[in-house]
Amino acid sequence: MITTVTLNVAVDKAYVVDELNKCEVMRVKTCSNTAGGKGLNVAKVARLCNEDVLATGFVGGHNGAYVEELLEGCQVKSQFVHVKGETRSCINVLAADGSSTEFLEPGEPIEPLEAEAFLSQFKEIAEKSEVVTISGSVPKGVDINIYGKLIDMVKAAGHKVILDTSGKLLEESIKSCPTMIKPNDDEIEALLGVSVTNREEIIAGAIKLREMGIPMVVVSLGSDGALLITEEGVYHGKPPKLDVVNTVGCGDSMTAAFAVGLYRGYDSKEMLRYAVAVSAANALTMKTGSFRQEDMQEILPQVEVYEVSSTASRQ
């Protein structure tokens, strides 16, 4: 089973407008609600990949109940700790020019006993989860070391764990050496205290992170695909040119596909090809954390995967 951890769950609202103008009344053309938070996007995509998925984290209030209902509609099982605070809402405004403007609420504080209840529950979940993904931010009241504790639990159970977060959370959590991390160039700079201005420096930084005890490092390159750095080598997966509709959730879709690849035992090249194809397919739909099987199947054989050296990358 694949388990996704989302401590800062949200109801995601997507507003489609003709244009976004400051200090004006905006008429929304369409609005859609989905179970949100990076980890829940991962859960939905992993389920679309036809794998058994469990979503866990904190939910509370009417919004929390709504999130559980929305996940049930996506055939994603959930096992949340219910808290006193109301689950947050986040808004993504999509304009006709292709721009995306997001408003992310911080989330209500979590009480110490609620955090302890989650850690106790998660220890049991980790035992039955072959792959765990940990994504996004944490609400107030949650210790900055919590992701490190979760990683240690998963590793103690002999299972694999993917970490996708940023800032201090990432800096603290990589000390526990998860199976995979997915930093961007800014995060590589912050973690290593180096300048990253080109592809060669990105690769060099990712190699240093792997040498710190993290077996797999993935760096997203946007429309140019992704890099995967493992003990086997450095690989670049590049999708075909596409008419992109919405890039929100592509990173989470990639995380989900890597989790599926780990679960299925794919080798590095096969895993990267699959992850790039799923991420690219996500960009062809307006839904966040979603893709159409026919899109992915069409893209998959067109994804180029090749090995690059540590000092050069094919353009």
Image (cartoon, grey):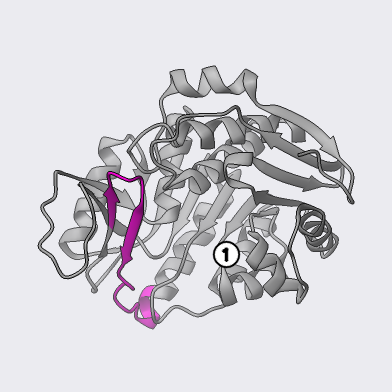
Q: Is residue 267 visible?
A: no
Quarter of the image for the C terminus: give it.
top right
Residue 182 at x, y = what percent?
63, 55
Give yes or no for residue 124 being in the magenta stretch. Answer: no
- Residue 168: in sight, yes or no? yes
Three-letter residue code for mark 1: Leu
Disc tally is 1
Front in this rendered view, residue 12 or 299 = 299
Which quadrant holds residue 110? bottom left
In this picture, which residue range is highlighted in magenta?
92-114
Q: Indicate the position of residue 241 as horizontal and vertical percent values.
A: 56, 29
| Residue toward you, 45 or 185 | 185
How far across and how far down the image is residue 142, in percent?
44, 78
Q: Is residue 47 left or right of residue 34?
A: right
Judged from the image, the secondary structure of the residue bearing numbered disc 1 is helix
Q: Position of residue 251 (x, y in %)?
A: 52, 48
Question: Mark 1 — residue?
Answer: 150
Q: Which residue occupies 57% across, 73% down? A: 167
Seen in the picture, residue 295 relative to 109 is either above or below; the reply is above
Q: Is the residue 281 above or below the residue 128 in the image?
A: above
- Vertical placement of 11 versus 273: above or below? below
Q: Quarter-wise, where is residue 224 in the image?
A: top right
Circle 1: is it few (<14), some (14-19), or many (20+) Cα within 10 Å?
A: many
Q: Residue at x 51, y 29 (%)?
A: 242
Q: Nearer the viewer, residue 126 or 314?
A: 314
**Looking at the image, which residue is at 36% across and 51% down?**
99
Q: Look at the image and say whether residue 113 sits in the magenta stretch.
A: yes
Q: Which residue is found at the position 50% from the left and 80% from the top?
A: 143
